Image (cartoon, rainbow, N blue to C red):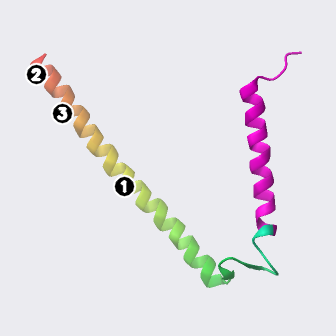
Amino acid sequence: MKAPSRPAKALVALGAALLSLLLAAPVALAENGVGLAGPTTDKTVTFFCFGVIAFFAILVIVLSVVQGRLEKRKERRRYDLERYG
């Protein structure tokens, strides 16, 4: 049986450390049900979720604009290469 490689061992160790941090975070940052942002109410959760929705909508729009500009640049460069070369 072949022993795991060094990068594989490092990846497993990193994954275990990340998992332990994720499992310990709720206990470390909450006291009696109150986290860093205060008591969690329906209003807080609603506004947070609206923020997440807005973030992804804006992300899609911005990345689409960037991709469109890169496509225009690529087509312009391709046209110039055909014209001059």
Question: Label 3 vs label 2: CA separation?
Answer: 10 Å
Label whose residue precedes the other's in the sequence (1 or 2): 1
- Is 11 in the magenta? yes
- Give the residue type at disc 1: Val
Circle 2 sits on which residue? 83
Residue 57 against residue 78 in the figure, above or below: below
Question: On the image, numbered disc 1 is attached to which residue?
Answer: 62
Mark 3 crowdedness (10 Å alpha carbons): few <14, some 14-19, many ≥20: few
In the picture, measured across the screen, residue 43 lies left or right of residue 58, that is: right
Identify the amino acid type marked 3.
Arg
Disc 2 marks a residue whose amino acid type is Arg
Q: Where is residue 66 in the image (x, y as percent from the top left)?
A: 33, 47
Q: Where is residue 39 in the image (x, y as percent from the top left)?
A: 70, 84
Residue shown at 57%/73% (left/top)? 48
Measuring 65% from the left and 83% from the top, which residue is drawn there? 42
x, y (%) of residue 1? 89, 15
Cα distance between the residues tagged 1 and 2:
32 Å
Q: Name the residue under label 3.
A: 76
Tag on residue 42?
A: none
